[in-house]
Image (spheres, grey):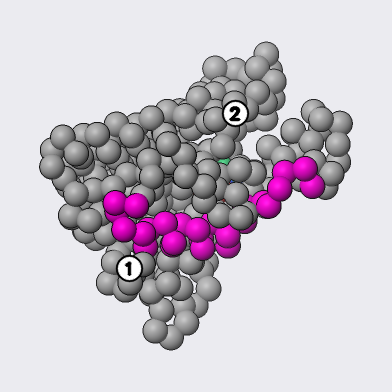
Amino acid sequence: MSDLSGRTTIVVGASRGLGHGIATAFAEAGAPVVAVSRTVAAFPEPANGSGTIQPEVVDAGDATVAGSLLDRYEPAAIILVAGASPHMRPLQHQTWETFSVNWQTDVRIAFHWLREALLTPLRPGGKVVVISSGAALAGSPLSGGYAGAKATQRFITGYAQDEAERAGLDITFTAVLPRFAPLTGVGRPAVQAYAARAGLSVEDFLAQQGPLVTPETAGTSLVELVQEDSADIAPAYVLTGAGLQKLP
Ligand SMILES: NC(=O)c1ccc[n+]([C@@H]2O[C@H](COP(=O)([O-])OP(=O)(O)OC[C@H]3O[C@@H](n4cnc5c(N)ncnc54)[C@H](OP(=O)(O)O)[C@@H]3O)[C@@H](O)[C@H]2O)c1
């Protein structure tokens, strides 16, 4: 387990939801955190001796943002959490625009930040975590192109790892696939839609899901992951409220 003090961590998508919990947890663990989002966020006052949170109000999908923030902050770790909330409708009720929203946001952001992590490149020992989704494994029939977009995020995280190895760069890339987090922007409408489709109340539906992800549990799990030795980090993980499970 490594000490996070002095190890700048950029959390992309930190104003709300899982990203807010992850940014808060890294600061509590002692990291200087750069919290990226398009809107201003409030964070709890860091306790004495813990890390700091520096907000950066920018669009992470802008092609120049990743490169300029990597140059300015020289982070030891990047956590890509930002994503759009899909339009929760069956396929025939999607438009092409609603179907493709997660390609235009989640995949676009991962694409820009992964390539800039390779091109800059991150310093040796650097780590990049991409928050994909459990939907990448199971599909998500009520959210248009969401599951495919999140699967693509996992694929390109693997491509980035291969390119790092080919170039002799000591950078570790991994994807984390959370199950439902029903209190956050993406999770809340998804849970309501799938509960309705199953003919269950939200409460009964959630009771079948096992331990649920929250911003706080996600923060704890991501801090533990980034503290691991690079050699022990798997290509991908499923994240539940009980923690991380390795995927091949
Ligand atoms: N919640 C779940 O059940 C669940 C399950 C599996 C995977 N996930 C994944 O986990 C991630 C977070 O989900 P969530 O439910 O926590 O979402 P959320 O509450 O809606 O928060 C999304 C965050 O992303 C930021 N963001 C979006 N577009 C951005 C952009 N262009 N530039 C900078 N920041 C941007 C938002 O900030 P601004 O609006 O201020 O920019 C916000 O901080 C998503 O990638 C989602 O697909 C969630």
Where is residue 94 drawn, in percent x and y? Answer: 63, 19
Which quarter of the figure is the C terminus placed in? top left
Characterize the local packing of mark 2: few (<14), some (14-19) or many (20 or more) Cα atoms within 10 angstroms.
few
| Label 2 vs 1, first from the N-terminus | 1
In the rendered view, would you say 111 is above or below 18? above
Position of the N terminus, as image quadrant, is bottom left
- In this view, which residue lies farthest toward the top? 92
Mark 1: give few (<14), some (14-19) or many (20+) Cα within 10 Å: few
The residue lying at 49 percent from left, 54 percent from top is: 19
Question: Residue 219, how many percent across, how many down?
Answer: 51, 60
Please give the range of residues in magenta: 207-232
202 vs 49, left or right, is: right
Q: Which mark is residue 53?
A: none
Residue at 50% across / 58% down in the picture?
A: 221
| Residue picked out by circle 1 | 2
Query: With 87 as the anchor, is 235 left or right in this view?
Result: left
Above-or-below relation of 137 to 230 = above
Amino acid marked by disc 1: Ser
Whether residue 185 appears in this view of the structure is no
The location of residue 193, given as percent across then percent down, is 74, 33
Local secondary structure at mark 1: loop
Tell me if residue 120 is in the magenta stretch. Answer: no
* Residue at the limit of the structure toward the left, as seen here: 168
Q: Residue furthest bottom?
A: 48
Report the residue marked by disc 2. 138
